Amino acid sequence: MRLSAILPCFNEEENVQNAYERITAALQVYEDYEIIITDDGSTDGTLKTVKALAARDPHVKYISFSRNFGNCAAFRIGYLYAAFDWSIQFDADLQSPPEEAHKLISKAREGWDVVFGIRKRRQDPLYRVLGTRFQQFLGKSVFGIDIPLGASVYRILRTSVARDVINHPTRAQYFIATVPYVTHNYTFVETEHHQRQAGRSKWRWRHIRDHTLDLYWGFSLRPLSLSWLLAAVALLGGVTALFFNQLSAQAVLVWGSLLAALQLVGLAILGEYMKRPFTSKPYYKQIYVRESNIPQCQIDFHTRDLLDDQ
């Protein structure tokens, strides 16, 4: 099996060398491999370390963004330029040990398109563990989203499937929830999970919030039905208030405040849908690459612009 390892990095100067060594040790037993490190606009010494690794090891490829575009953009661009038939995604923080990759690879060899790692005894703050479970439970049971429960970013999949996923015309960028649109031939394996060894997690409350809204509003139309229900309730309430026009001024004020609140909630739901793109424009087209040692990437993001100018 030939493998493309995708390693997104953002300010991981303390971890990227160790991640490279452990990923190399885990993959060098296979037929062939490459490690594509996507530097997501790091402001520390991450890129310098990555370029040094690439200078001495031809297995290392790198793509450096002009600024921080987010983790989703980083791994998506890695899938786009993967050279081999299978792609396996790692995290630079090494919480999902590269030594566990053989479990994913062994399962993929059984004929699956995608194999997700499920974190056993997840070593994250309790609010993140419970938050993820609650988010996915609501997504599946309340919003009716076909999301692989428990799936993590530690995964192996056919590169062709990964590209179909990143090009799928969904309303939001949520890779795990998009996979079932492309294939139902996926499964899970349990993998160990460790605490971050160095540096700080880049995920903050705002990232969790935005990711959750992308899941719910990007993959379900049920909130739109709720907005219609709220509008109907507001209309019915208004007609009722007019019919019983002998209500006290205090009751009218209460009714008016309630109806206004319902209308605002409905408008907020509609606004969430309206601000998300409803086009099939691939997300990677919005990324700007500063430099790369992958020839095709250089052509796509540099030579192409020169040809356009001519």
Image (cartoon, rainbow, N blue to C red):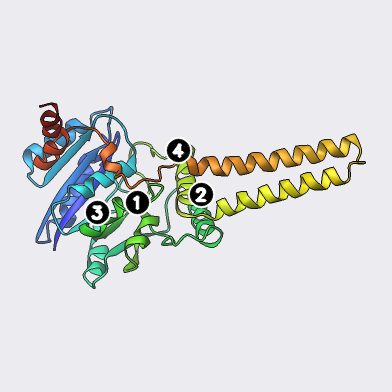
Residue at the (26%, 52%) spot, across then down:
89
- SS of the residue under disc 3: helix
Residue for badge 3 = 163
- Percent of width and height locating residue 152: 37, 55
Mark 2: which amino acid?
Leu
Mark 4 or 2, nearer chain start: 2
Q: Is residue 18 left or right of residue 71?
A: left
Give the alpha-carbon distance from disc 1 to disc 3, as whole Å.
Answer: 12 Å
Q: Label 3 crowding class (10 Å Cα cut-off): few <14, some 14-19, many 20+?
A: some
Q: Of the numbered discs in the image, which one, if any, rests on residue 126?
A: 2
Mark in front: 1 vs 4? 1
Mark 4: which amino acid?
Arg
Mark 1 or 3, nearer chain start: 3
Residue for badge 1 = 169
Nearest the eye: 95 or 269: 269
Mark 3: which amino acid?
Arg
Q: Label 2 crowding class (10 Å Cα cut-off): few <14, some 14-19, many 20+?
A: few
Q: Quadrant of residue 289?
A: top left
Q: Of the numbered discs in the image, which one, if any, rests on residue 204?
A: 4
Q: Is residue 128 visible?
A: yes
- Percent of width and height locating residue 215: 46, 50
- Percent of width and height locating residue 43: 28, 27
